[in-house]
Image (cartoon, grey):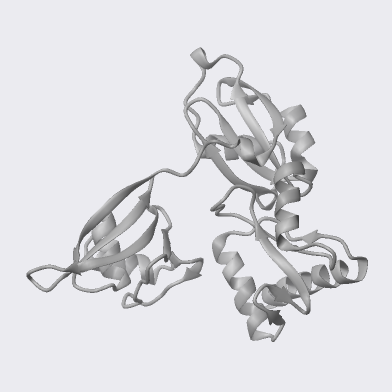
Amino acid sequence: MNEDKLLLGRIKDLARRSYEGNYVTNTDFLSASELYEVNALCAGEGLMTGRNQIEGVDFVIYGGPEEAERALICFLPSFMSEAEFLASEREQGDIISTILIEPVNRKFADELSHRDFLGALMNLGIERNRIGDIRSSASKGYVFVLKEVAGLICDELCRIKHTTVTCREVSVSECDIVPEFCPVSGTVSSNRLDAILSLVYKLSRSKTAELIKSERVFVDGKTILSPGHELRIGNRVSVRGFGKFEFEGSSGVSKKGRLMVSVKKYK
């Protein structure tokens, strides 16, 4: 409860500062579940005065690349629209910096994972809430961070595992690594969450129930505790320790009366 009060106080303070100073203010990076919690708390306290407005101040959820998992809540001044804010950020990166990290010698470079990049950044003393999404491939990585820590990373990060790397700031539009996914389809008895989880991850219904009960399953950022929760088209499901997928819906009914469904499972 105290944490909720602190969070609400922080959100109200940022909105007030943006309104009174007429400039952009922003939170640190928040996960999908944290963003959902902020929205629920603000709605519960009557702070939502519009679809994307808190206490009369417009805000934008922005994380850098499209479909970012981690994002900021950015409060806008009266003279700036959402479109203008996004255009400015994509061109200048005043709030979120995009850093390209590449090995000096690709021939002798380690194959670096998301965990390797994150570990190297945190070893510099950078807190997790200063770091947004990390997108990596076999040859490079893009990290999205608050502008205030970009200089430290570019100056100090020179090695990840056994690989010597270089870092430089680029525009967000230069990030050419997009999330990859594979299609999964099959038949289920219904759109129940436990049934879809069983199909996607090839788990027993008892195992999916255990995952849900242990608060490891999130739908659009919200922790779901009911195995019978029905998924809708476009729902994004994240299962801690297993990955995530997007529910695409059903395409019909099989001869045995079962729903034919499909999802996009992210690699």
Q: Is residue 154 visible?
A: yes
| Residue visible at 74% across and 30% down in the picture | 154
Q: Is residue 249 left or right of residue 221?
A: left
The x and y percentages for residue 232 are 37, 71
| Residue visible at 45% across and 66% down in the picture | 218
| Residue visible at 57% across and 14% down in the picture | 105
When the figure is inspected, residue 188 is found, relative to residue 83, above or below; the finding is: below
| Residue visible at 75% across and 56% down in the picture | 84
Tell which residue pokes out farthest to the right in this image: 21
Quarter residue 199 falls in? bottom left
When the figure is inspected, residue 177 is found, relative to residue 195, above or below; the finding is: above
Q: Quadrant of the C terminus?
A: top left
The x and y percentages for residue 52 are 67, 72
Q: Quadrant of the N terminus?
A: bottom right
Quarter residue 50 falls in? bottom right
When the figure is inspected, residue 45 is found, relative to residue 79, above or below; the finding is: below
Q: Is residue 100 left or right of residue 147?
A: left
The x and y percentages for residue 225 are 40, 75
**Number of callouts:** 0
Q: Is residue 122 visible?
A: no
Front position in the image: 123 or 14: 14
The x and y percentages for residue 227 are 32, 74
